Amino acid sequence: MSVGQLAVVGIGPGNREWITPEAASVLAHATDLVGYSTYLARVPPQDCQIRHSSDNRAELTRARQALSLAAKGRAVAVVSGGDPGVFAMAAAVFEAIETKSPVWDDVQVTIIPGITAMQAAAARIGAPLGHDFCAISLSDNLKPWAVIERRLAAAAEADFVVAIYNPASKARPDRIHDAFARLRQRRAGTTPVVFARAIGRKDERIEITTLAEADPSIADMATLVIVGSSETRLIARQAPALPYVYTPRSYGARR
Amino acid sequence: MSVGQLAVVGIGPGNREWITPEAASVLAHATDLVGYSTYLARVPPQDCQIRHSSDNRAELTRARQALSLAAKGRAVAVVSGGDPGVFAMAAAVFEAIETKSPVWDDVQVTIIPGITAMQAAAARIGAPLGHDFCAISLSDNLKPWAVIERRLAAAAEADFVVAIYNPASKARPDRIHDAFARLRQRRAGTTPVVFARAIGRKDERIEITTLAEADPSIADMATLVIVGSSETRLIARQAPALPYVYTPRSYGARR
């Protein structure tokens, strides 16, 4: 039996100009595409390629389906938004392999990196991630909220720039408010905050504000939130251009 | 006078298959390329395009040179390794703008994101960044070592996966040893550690080890180090394949 192949492919946040040649090539040569319907819709159609679309939440089921197809000798691409390695499909595939069906042992798994939301958001507004930063998902489907709180507190305490993924959902609208309350305890009200929604897509929207004035309820599941460090600052520009937001490479030079 | 344009372009860690179409297009249409000679050498030559190459350390000088060229109406691309927004050239450009020459006000600055080293390293070995993580540069040229220590301690305390950039240099060979000593105080000896060197280039080399057994002196400036969280784990594979390294999306499920 031929050895199957499974590639987990990052297609970035939505703009085709951010899909790497590697990702485009793997998608073009796959016999089967597996993924959330919204992401599959971003991949140009190909004759003879089978699409297996599923709901957004079914990551583990989707991973198992992809592995089973690959074990049958198909060349499978799991289509992931952003970078599959950053709060996306790659970890779900390895979870599936770990709780494994022995027939998956021979499947060759490759991960194809992509531009993730925080990079796209950062690029649009300047260089907010120009210094040490952390990335935290507020999704508490799979981890206790106490772990998230501990990480937000540590990040604020150690003055990291914080990129917040999955800031809100219908199931947990209050989490982002809790997170902001925690950050406000430890960081100045003047700290720059960016809400970057649907970057690279038609409905892209960016709001630059401060920690004191931010209204976290504007963040939905398509929003990436960046909260600056004590060093993150704005450079004003002539309207209607938004200011640049950036974190310098040096630390403490202004004090 | 025509308005100049300055794009800070991320070309990824070295493999051309990771250069986005957006980056390739901006590089092809620039009149001038500015950058560290090693990065410029990765960009295909173009007739009539002027190359301004410089030493690796001269980020601010290079940024000012690029802004001055753009202010004269040139279409300038600053070529950056990885993602320009992550420990690379974008922040240096905004630092230059902030301490500004007024003639730079009209320069349109755009940042073109790219695959950064931690994404490339993660993709090669599995999904170590599959859960909350932070990125820390050990370069203390521009920030006090005490700040780095505080961040390493906070990251370990809050159980983030840690991606370490700029782990070593001739000027500060001991820093990575100090960093490991600090992480070992707070995290189990069995924690997976990855040294990923020159990913995507000919001399790519990956070592997967543990926090107890890691020899930090193998990390040079081309190495990206990933230190797992308490949840990061290996999935064994048949030799000579390296094990997969991944951090599951769930937290605490194993305890």
Image: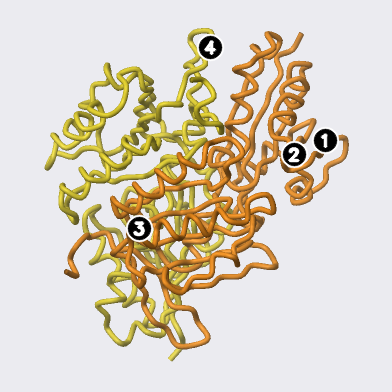
Chain colours: A yellow, B orange
Chain at numbered mark 2: B
Q: Which residue is mark 2?
A: B35
Q: Are marks 1 and 2 on the same chain?
A: yes
Q: Which residue is mark 4?
A: A237
Q: Position of residue B164 (x, y in %)?
A: 50, 53
In the image, residue A213 above or below residue B49: above
Mark 1, secondary structure of its residue: strand
Quarter of the image where one finds residue B2? top right
Q: Quadrant of the N terminus of chain A?
A: bottom left
Neighbour class for label 4 at 10 Å: few (<14), some, many (≥20)? few
Left or right: A183 as drawn, with respect to A34: left
Quarter of the image where one finds residue A94? bottom left
Q: Are marks 3 and 4 on the same chain?
A: no
Q: Mark 3 to mark 4: distance in Å? A: 37 Å
Q: Which residue is mark 1?
A: B52
Q: Please, what is the three-letter code of the amino acid marked with disc 4?
A: Arg
Q: Mark 4 to mark 2: distance in Å? A: 26 Å
Out of A62 and B34, give the one closest to the viewer.
B34
Q: Which residue is mark 3?
A: B130
Q: Position of residue A190 (x, y in %)?
A: 35, 17
Chain at numbered mark 1: B
In the image, residue A43 above or below residue B68: below
Q: Earlier in the sequence, mark 1 or mark 2?
A: 2
